[in-house]
DNA sequence: CCGCCTGACTTGACCGGACAAATGAAATGA
DNA sequence: TCATTTCATTTGTCCGGTCAAGTCAGGCGG
């Protein structure tokens, strides 16, 4: 391999332990950070980079793959490589791989349905849910326990689109939370889950059911489930009286380049 | 390209829009799910897979790359490819790319330090912190506001290792939260952040400072910052009186194969 | 028996080449 | 002028080949 100006390999070729594609990626990352190309600009073509760095197309492609994986660029067949960002921001990721971690309790909890009713969303409710006015939903109120014999874990309010209401029949029959039952029956998957957590008091009408004093502080966890088209199809709201429950998350730092 | 038994490409070669490496990856994924190899077993070598699927080594390597990115296998130079999992679990990821999302409030908040003192962790405190007995820490109590003129957002208790205590001098002088100030001064990065969220009441001695009634429900958010060696070096605990604050997270579903 | 060396094997990196698929600008025709 | 077609360019896919780096089992020597 002959040397080129891009990597200064005439001096470091024998000493640099990084693979060549890594050197190219690091150099491109440094140039992005230095502002050589603004966001939105086109990076040089693969052919140009091969000439600049005096490496094969294979090596350039591996380097660009790293940049794309980092979110710095976007590559388009026929078009070229576009700058998306000048630097990789510090990232922390919570990676949830099992249902217990997602819901914050074991899968085998018991849900006792108290009441259920169908309604059509008026303007105010529609705005709260994030749906259209007049759309049909089912509202379910229930108590969740770890086991039948344990103290209530939370008071749960479920909203589910009326078109998926038959999944409610599977509660207590099939294992898993409602969103999994919907997926089983209708093939609708949650592409996005929005979680809101706030503190409040246990409302009086829930206190006795939860076996706590009225006014006990409670952790309110609300989850909105959105399908692949961004449509809300389920909302689950749990009121957990203190100190029975702590919501936990572990955030891992993601390195800059893979 | 001649045909082989692996992909049955004699019939679908012109019709299957998937790239060849994708077909190989999908077939290997199906075989894993079918239990052809147990966890811990070695997958056939690249050369064997080339023969089985009648494709080049390049194509096999691309397929294996996909499997590795999915966490199904681990590839080791000189050794081979080991099965890590038989299927990709459903995954949801919270991807946090800016500080406001991490801390749940804008970077430019004002922290008013009330008091600070150094202490050595006794056995009980050491167990709570997750550190060794006798280690030196600084405890800081402060009020956080969005601006000097707004109502208090939360009552904050910070614990920081005594060896990093000079970073406290940068509070209010340099922008950013304490963990960023530690990183700037000492180069110590949070590799992991553990978040606990619970509901409680505002303690009486904090109520007046927070300008709320005693007993007001509060959202308690505790963050433990761990360095690259898994050592806790900072703990931040905020008590947010209701209803001033909601903790939000967005979880995105991750597809099975990239 | 244990430690070291060697050699076969496996994956990682890199080169060169060819063709396919997609894009966007320019040219053409109505 | 606008819509369609054409063409040059760019990235995606795939093949074949070579050498490097790493692993591990077997053999040898102390």
Image: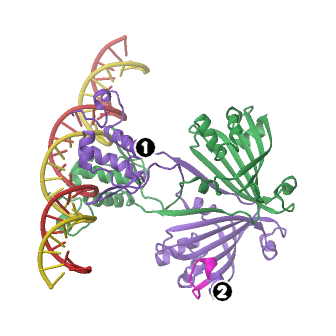
Chain colours: A green, B purple, C red, D yellow
Residue B11 against residue B217 in the figure, above or below: above
Question: Please, what secondary structure does the residue beneath circle 1 have?
Answer: loop
Residue at point 66%, 86% (across, down):
B117
Q: Nearer the viewer, mark 2 or mark 1?
A: 1
Instruction: Tell me, yes or no, if residue A37 can be seen here.
Output: no
Q: State yes or no: discs 2 and 1 in contact (Cβ < 8 Å).
A: no
Q: Where is residue A231 in the image (x, y as percent from the top left)?
A: 62, 38
Residue designated by label 2? B117
Question: Please, what secondary structure does the residue beneath circle 2 have?
Answer: strand
Residue A219 against residue C6 in the figure, above or below: above
Residue at point 58%, 75% (across, down):
B234
Other-residue count near label 1 (Cα within 10 Å), few / some / many at <14 / 14–19 / ≥20: few
Q: Where is residue A202 in the image (x, y as percent from the top left)?
A: 82, 58
Q: Could you say which is closer to the camera, residue B184 or residue B255?
A: B255
| Rendered-image quadrant of the C terminus of chain A | bottom left
Residue A92 against residue B55 in the figure, above or below: below
Residue B3 part of the magenta segment: no
Residue B135 part of the magenta segment: yes
Residue at point 81%, 57% (across, down):
A210
Chain ID at mark 2: B
Residue designated by label 1? B34
Give the Cα separation between the discs numbered 2 and 1. 60 Å
User: Left or right of A160: which side holds A99?
Assistant: left
- The total number of labels drawn is 2
Instruction: Tell me, yes or no, if residue A129 can be seen here.
Output: yes
Could you tell which of marks 2 and 1 lies nearer the N-terminus?
Answer: 1
Chain ID at mark 1: B
Magenta-drawn segment: B126-137
């Amino acid at each position: 391999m002959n040397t080129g100006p891009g990597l200064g390999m005439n001096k470091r070729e024998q000493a640099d332990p990084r693979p060549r594609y890594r050197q190219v990626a690091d150099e491109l990352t440094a140039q992005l950070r230095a502002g050589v190309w603004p966001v939105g600009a086109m990076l040089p073509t693969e052919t140009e980079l091969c000439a600049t760095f005096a490496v094969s197309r294979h090596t350039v492609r591996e380097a660009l793959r790293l940049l794309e994986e980092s979110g710095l660029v976007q590559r388009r067949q026929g078009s070229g490589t576009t700058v998306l960002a000048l630097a990789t921001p510090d990232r922390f990721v919570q990676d949830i791989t099992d249902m217990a971690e997602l819901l914050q309790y074991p899968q085998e909890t018991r849900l006792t349905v108290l009441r259920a009713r169908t309604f059509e969303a008026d303007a105010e409710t529609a705005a709260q849910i994030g749906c259209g006015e007049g759309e049909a939903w089912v509202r379910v109120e229930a108590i969740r326990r770890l086991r039948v014999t344990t103290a209530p874990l939370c008071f749960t309010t479920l909203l589910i689109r009326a078109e998926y209401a038959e999944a409610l029949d599977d509660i207590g029959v099939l294992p898993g939370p409602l969103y999994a039952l919907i997926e089983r029956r209708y093939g609708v998957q949650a592409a996005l889950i929005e979680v809101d957590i706030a503190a409040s008091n246990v409302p009086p009408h829930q206190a006795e059911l939860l076996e706590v004093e009225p006014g006990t502080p409670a952790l309110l966890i609300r989850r909105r489930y959105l399908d692949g088209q961004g449509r809300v199809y389920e909302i689950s709201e749990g009121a957990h009286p203190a100190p029975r429950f702590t919501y936990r998350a572990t955030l891992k730092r993601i390195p800059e380049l893979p």
